[in-house]
Amino acid sequence: KAGVTQTPRYLIKTRGQQVTLSCSPISGHRSVSWYQQTPGQGLQFLFEYFSETQRNKGNFPGRFSGRQFSNSRSEMNVSTLELGDSALYLCASSLLPGLIGGDDYEQFFGPGTRLTVL
Amino acid sequence: AQSVTQLDSHVSVSEGTPVLLRCNYSSSYSPSLFWYVQHPNKGLQLLLKYTSAATLVKGINGFEAEFKKSETSFHLTKPSAHMSDAAEYFCVVTLPRGATNKLIFGTGTLLAVQP
């Protein structure tokens, strides 16, 4: 079974531009979460989606948005890019939302999209 | 609120010697705790998880961790380090069953394994 796929793997943008990152979960997984990883702030939760609905949102400005499609694929968008948005953006999928207890809830991470803002 | 503190940002061991990566947690609820590993240019991989069952949890690649409520700790150990263990390790806490998929990560411990 293929793992979580994120595209593109690398992206270079300039300040003020916008960017869209894509995540394809493992086949059959319906829950997708996004995380931002930076050297200064570490790994921080962005959003969580299930059945095309956002279930939870992290403490990020409104420039960060996301959505989930009916096939469970997810996209996140960052508008008006700032230098501080340079980061590794990680997507994770799980069979179901919620966590704990069997493998149904384990989150599987993709390799990430490395975004550089110049 | 939930949080985790990884007490060492860098740990260096020799191949074949024991590994200890320390993690303390804070949680208003009985937490679920995880250890993830991240190899360079790779995604995060789950090593092991504690979900209120056995307090000693065994994971992949010979790693294990013990949940100690009295010490609010969840330290990761391995009896004998291998060169392939060199990576960054994250201690993670989340809310109890079903509440959310939101994972709260520690700041990470970079493990170096010397030959």
Image (cartoon, rainbow, N blue to C red):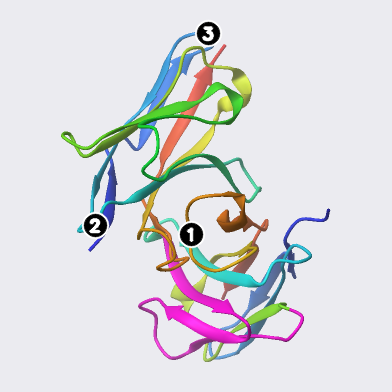
Residue hosting label 2: B29
Which label sits in the foreground, 3 or 1? Answer: 1
In percent of width and height, residue A73 lies at: 72, 77
Q: Which residue is located at x 66 percent, y 81 percent?
A: A75
- Using the rendered view, name the quadrant where residue B70 is placed: top left
- What residue is rendered at 54% in x and 69% in y? A97
Quadrant the C terminus of chain B occupies: top right
Callouts 3 and 1 in the same chain: no
Chain containing mark 1? A
Amino acid type, label 3 = Gly
Q: Look at label 2 and name its amino acid.
A: Tyr
Which quarter of the picture shows residue A6? bottom right
Whether the residues at callouts 2 and 3 have beta carbons within 8 Å, the answer is no
Same-chain check, marks 2 and 1: no
Work out how far the residue at label 2 is from the one at label 3, CA to CA, in angstroms: 37 Å
State which region is magenta.
Answer: A43-71
Q: Which residue matches tag 3? A: B16
In the displayed structure, A51 sits above or below A9; it is below
- Which residue of the protein is positioned furthest toward the front in this rendering? B53
- Apparent side of residue B77 relative to residue A89 in the rendered image (left or right): left
Q: Are marks 3 and 1 in contact (CB under 8 Å)?
A: no
Q: Secondary structure at mark 3?
A: loop
Residue located 56% across and 78% down the image: A49
Q: Is residue A58 magenta?
A: yes
Q: Residues within 10 Å of mark 1 (few under 14, many from 20)?
A: many
Residue A66 can be seen, yes or no? no
Establish if B84 lies above or below A118.
above
